[in-house]
Image: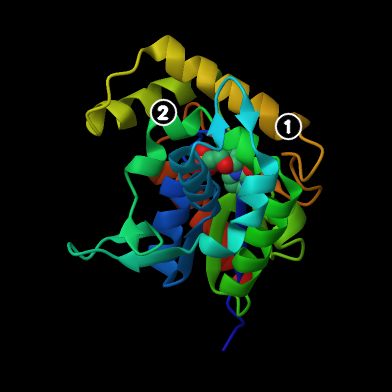
Amino acid sequence: MTKPLTIAIDGHSSTGKSTLAKALAKSMNYVYVDSGAMYRAVALYALRKGWVSKENGCDSKAIEGALDDVHISFELDTSGTNATFLNGHRVEEEIREMAVSHVVSHVAKLSEVRRHLVALQQAMGRNGGVVMDGRDIGTVVFPNAELKIFMTASDDVRAARRKAELDHNGQVVSFTEVLENLKSRDKADMERSDSPLFAAADARTLDNSDMSRDDQFELVLGWAKNLLV
Ligand code: DC
């Protein structure tokens, strides 16, 4: 039997990484790991403790000191859907709210947080057969991944997609606020000193501004299948 692949999907915010990663994992019978959900869960924990705010940044010492008390897992919820859990409680929707989006970059730039989460991510993908999406998966978490994809799309397309997702979850947010948040998170991701966002030299770039979900899926599934023969 051919060794199962490690598939790393990185890219800018709201480029459809998780949609593609989930579909790919399902079709290949691989595990899907949403690394962004892990940064969001730590940010939510810090937000609840009052250790981070959009304007004032974060109390890095408090957050770093509490990392062993933050237990993040991906489990099936009561409806049988895979969801993010924080210390035993389902937080799948709460971590996607704007309150968390506004502060997550402050938390994601902390080296101790990154080290902690990267170790968990590497353990989850130790045996291959994994599709993981994020910002540093092909560069830091799995530099030897057999398939690396770097996703991008125009700002307007990304903001429209994200707004539709928020609308769907009943959150009333203006297009401008969503667009500004995307841009500021991209900037923070690309400019942070620890593990900034960039495309690995061996990543295949996928600009999906004008591509349907099905077309992206077929293209990437083809790449993966070619690596398995
Ligand atoms: O993919 P996302 O938008 O849910 O990620 C949330 C934030 O976490 C994002 O603003 C950047 C950060 N992140 C990161 O720094 N490294 C990762 N591997 C994944 C996400």
Circle 2 SS class: helix
Residue under the image location 55 percent in, 53 percent down: 35
Asked if one can make out residue 8 in the rendered structure from this viewpoint, the answer is: yes
Badge 2: residue crowd in 10 Å (few <14, some 14–19, many ≥20): some
Residue bearing mark 1: 190
Badge 1: residue crowd in 10 Å (few <14, some 14–19, many ≥20): some
Number of marks:
2
Asked if one can make out residue 151 in the rendered structure from this viewpoint, the answer is: no
Q: Quadrant of ligand 1?
A: top right
Label placed on residue 98? 2
Q: Is residue 38 left or right of residue 187?
A: left
Circle 1 SS class: helix
Nearest the eye: 63 or 147? 63
Position of residue 144 relative to residue 220, above or below, is below
Residue 14 percent coordinates (x, y)? 49, 33
Position of residue 183 relative to residue 88, above or below, is above
Q: Is residue 114 left or right of residue 82?
A: right
Q: Is residue 129 left or right of residue 160?
A: right
Q: Is residue 78 left or right of residue 29?
A: left
Disc 1/disc 2 C-alpha distance (Å): 20 Å
Nearest the eye: 182 or 91? 91
Q: Residue furthest bottom?
A: 1
Residue under the image location 71 percent in, 44 percent down: 110
Residue under the image location 61 percent in, 67 percent down: 120
Residue 58 percent coordinates (x, y)? 63, 34
CB under 8 Å between discs 1 and 2: no
In which quadrant of the rendered image does the N terminus lie? Answer: bottom right
Residue 192 percent coordinates (x, y)? 76, 34
Q: Residue furthest left?
A: 79
Residue under the image location 52 percent in, 21 percent down: 181
Label placed on residue 52? none
Amino acid carrying label 2: it is Met
